[in-house]
Image (cartoon, grey):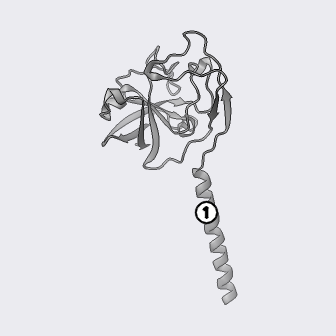
Amino acid sequence: MNVCISTASLVVLLILISAKSLCCEAQQCRPSGRIIGKKPPAGECNQENDSECCVEGKTYRTYKCSPAVSSNTMAQLTLNSFEKGGDGGGPSACDNKYHSDDTPVVALSTGWFNNMSRCLHNVTITANGKSVVAMVVDECDSTMGCDQDHDFQPPCPNNIVDASKAVWKALGVPHSQWGGLQITWADA
């Protein structure tokens, strides 16, 4: 009887250890590669909203993943224009359209964008004591950058919610502080 209890205890212990290691592994997101920056052609990198242009010779990390999504996922909110001619580049990946800066829309880092599975779905963004619902319309590409398709901007970090001006306004962030803000978000 003691042997059965010991064996059963050992099996349960191994299952718990395995489950714990899988849990932690799923939450880890390490760089998947790197890109060496190229100097953008004159006038080709739109620096609206303080967007960064690639620097020749600088190494940029790339990611195929993002941190695990929860009901309170921590992220960095950045500012993006989804309008034609804006710093977002071409039309949005989800619907091949441009969107007004007055509409609450976002682009998510590659891992969170999840092969377009969040396209045209809403997310709730919380910061500054307020929340806003925004629609996912694009990917903030964490796997590529420094080329014409990406407006000669570096790859996005893996924890970005790139938001229109409407999102920043709804969160009540003073205009002078727009550009980078710690937030939480969740699927709505």
Q: Position of residue 20 (x, y in %)?
A: 59, 62
Which residue: 55% across, 31% down? 156
Q: Nearer the viewer, residue 57 or 169?
A: 57
Indicate the quadrant containing the C terminus: top left, top right, bottom left or bottom right: top left
Give the quarter of the image for residue 182. top left
Can residue 187 be spotted in the picture? no
Q: Is residue 85 visible?
A: yes
Residue for point 56% across, 42% down:
66
Q: In the depicted view, which residue is nearer to us: 46 or 96? A: 46
For label 1, count other residues whose C-alpha is less than 10 Å away and answer few (under 14), some (14-19) or many (20+): few
Drawn side of residue 55 relative to residue 130, left or right: right
Image quadrant in which you'd find residue 177: top left
**How far from the left and from the top, in percent, is residue 53?**
55, 21
Q: Which of the image's four quarters has the N terminus?
A: bottom right
> In the rendering, at what x and y percent does residue 63 appear?
62, 37
Identify the residue under disc 1: 19
Where 22 falls versus 140 (above or below)? below
Q: Residue at x 67, y 33 (%)?
A: 34
* Amino acid type, residue under disc 1 in the picture: Ala
**Relative height, residue 13 to residue 110 (above, below):** below
Corner quadrant of residue 36: top right
Q: Is disc 1 placed on a helix, strand or loop? A: helix
Q: Is residue 56 left or right of residue 187?
A: right
**Residue furthest out toward the top:** 42
Residue sitting at x 46%, y 38%: 76
Numbered label tally: 1
Which residue appears farthest toward the bottom when viewing the image? 1
- 154 lies above or below 115: above
